[in-house]
Image: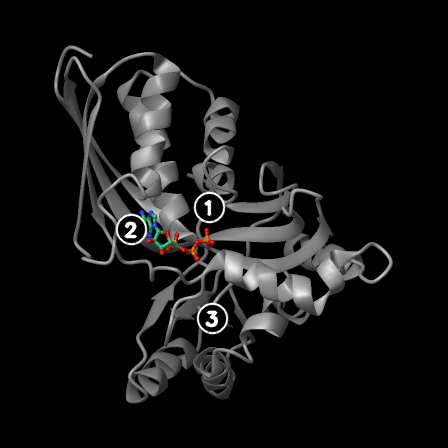
Amino acid sequence: MKDKKSISLRANAKINLFLDIESRRENGYHTVKSLMHSVSLSDTVDITVSPSDTTQIAITSSSPSVPTDRTNLAWRAAEAFLSAVGTTCRVEIYIEKNIPIASGLAGGSTDAAAVFRGLNELFDNKFDTQSLCDMGARLGADIPFCIVGGSKRVGGIGEILADAAVMPDCKIVIACGGEGVSTPWAYGKLDSMYSAFDGSAYSCRTEIFDALTHSLRAGDMSGICNNAYNIFESAVLCERPVAQRIKDVMMEAGARGAMMSGSGPSVFGIFDLDCDGAERAVALLAKEGIVGHICCPAGEN
Ligand code: ATP
């Protein structure tokens, strides 16, 4: 690294159109069957690198809730990338935070993914996408998906990605109210509800998943909404009545379907492009003091 260089990237949030557990490994990790889809609700990540004999990382953000130390996944992505290159430099990262935090939208993971993508570009595309995903998977289960983006069937603990068809054009409203959810807490609740996913006591809803991916291929919005599924709703909605209320408001406003994303508590509603249901949902939510973001499905990065 001889010169100072900068890059600015959009870091899209993700929603889960499907999320179920396949098994629980002995080490406590859960393998998932998921359909992740990028949406245009995004953070902006600005990265500047400059020559330095030691690795120095600095993070600033528009939001005081974003950690600015090594607990920020973006920091650890920068560290991992520089160590893989075998070099040192100063990395300054600014995160314009728009994605609600701790809400099941992969906000931290997408910022880290943007750092991997951005640094790779500043270092002349030293690594291919698979190598970046391998580095990302060591830091967080959602990072490989966030590096690639688009619409993907996701397996393993998040490291297995396969293409799926993108959603038809539509409006998506995303809203989050009340206290955030810690992902380990939500998995703990599922373990106690489903006997730790003991093989004989639980089976993954594969048929619904197949019907969903078929509906995506056919561009059949009714099929997509009818087959959307998230096992975390059974554990989280009863503890987060605001999330249930947001779902109800979205449906009242005319959503084709509404569901919690990831481990919650954010909820997304899917609305037809040619109606004002999304705007109505945002207005109804605002009356209850809840911010709704209107966005749309996003393709690969
Ligand atoms: P996932 O869907 O991947 O489980 P999430 O969207 O539920 O993630 P995040 O927004 O990533 O949750 O926040 C989870 C925790 O991660 C927060 O408590 C926060 O302190 C920490 N964190 C680390 N890096 C970031 C970041 N860049 N932006 C926001 N939170 C971050």
Label 3, on which residue?
267
- Color theme of the render: one colour
Q: Mark 1 and mark 2: span between their CA atoms? A: 16 Å
Label 1, on which residue?
299
Q: Position of residue 209 (x, y in %)?
A: 72, 57
The answer to whether residue 77 of the structure is visible from this angle is yes
Say which element carries label 2: strand
Residue in the picture at 43% in, 67% down? 171
Say if disc 2 is inside 8 Å of ligand 1. yes
* Quadrant of residue 116 within the rendered picture: top left
Q: Nearer the viewer, mark 1 or mark 3?
A: 3
Looking at the image, tell me whether mark 2 or mark 3 is earlier in sequence order.
2
- Badge number at residue 43: 2
Q: Amino acid at mark 3?
A: Val
Residue in the picture at 35% in, 41% down? 73
Figure check: 285 above or below 56: below
